[in-house]
Amino acid sequence: MKQVSVRSISKELAVNDGPPRVLVLDDDAELRSMLRRYLGDHGFDVRAVENPEQLDRYLQREPYDALVLDLMMPGEDGLSVCRRLRAAGQTIPVLMLTARGDPIDRILGLEMGADDYLSKPFDPRELVARLRAMFRRQRMLHTDSTWDDDEIKAFGPFALNVSKMRLTRGAEAITLSSMEFQLLRVFASNPHRPLSRDHLLEKIHGRDHESMDRSLDVQVLRLRRKIEEEPRKPRYIRTVWGIGYVFVPDCDPA
């Protein structure tokens, strides 16, 4: 497989002008056709592909604002595609379509770097609602005035550059998915403050997203693996039993 180049969100979404660009990967031709029509009728600019090779070519040519990715496909499945994209530094928000309501499918998808999930069969209206929630979060990341454009949050050897959506450790750039970035941003904005799971879910998903503690725990685990020397004994993102998590940027003794 070719390595996929890293691109930011499209100009249309960044300036809040024009239709959000959605890329769909599903091997079901009937579903692809339905999603092109339905999402197009609801204001999205949609491209649909049937295999990972086509996906890679589309991502190399131009930026997209969201990827709707089928989990169960012949050959390289959705989990492998998502893992490969994240390993290559691709930060596009991913909504995973799972064929079953089995929680393990959702958890595996989140662990591979997906930002959200939807079980088949699904109501296309719910897909539209989830995509719109994704785009609201993306716009907030680029237009939120609560942080100065050049503000950098430092903790330990790390520096979080908000305007560039970049985390570095010294000269090394650390790739974060959009969800991981949002989560770290919330933590960095609230040092030493215990944050409940409900509060974190609201900040990163919005009020219109269903609460799922396990999905948040998976995202926290992924983030810990990227910033903690010992993820099982975290120094920065600590568990507060019965509440949620607390961010300790100056590494006080646990």
Image: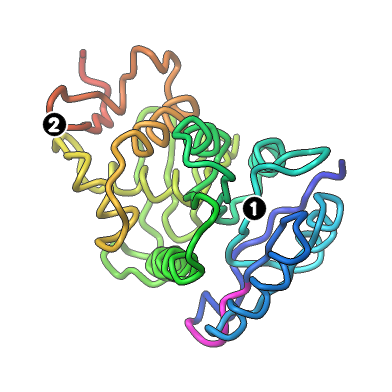
- Determine the CA span between mark 2 and mark 1: 33 Å
Q: Amino acid at mark 1?
A: Leu
- Vertical placement of 184 versus 35: above or below? above
Q: Which residue is mark 1?
A: 69
- Vertical placement of 107 versus 12: above or below? above
**What is the span of residues highlighted in magenta in the rendered image?**
16-21
**What residue lies at 29% left-to-right and 37% top-to-bottom?**
213
What x and y, as percent, mark residue 80? 70, 36
**What residue lies at 81% left-to-right and 54% top-to-bottom?**
56
Q: Amino acid at mark 2?
A: Ile
Quadrant for residue 100, please give it. Answer: top right
What x and y, as percent, mark residue 97? 58, 51
Q: Which residue is mark 2?
A: 243
Nearer to me, 18 or 110: 110
Quadrant (top left, top right, bottom left, bottom right) of the N terminus: top right
Pointer 2 or 1: first along the chain: 1
Circle 2 or circle 1, nearest the eye: 1
In the rendered view, does 2 fall on the left or right side of 115? right
Nearer to me, 227 or 131: 131
Is residue 17 part of the magenta span, yes or no?
Answer: yes
What x and y, as percent, mark residue 138? 45, 65
- Vertical placement of 204 versus 58: above or below? above
In the rendered view, does 14 fall on the left or right side of 151? right
What x and y, as percent, mark residue 77? 73, 39
- Vertical placement of 102 versus 73: above or below? above
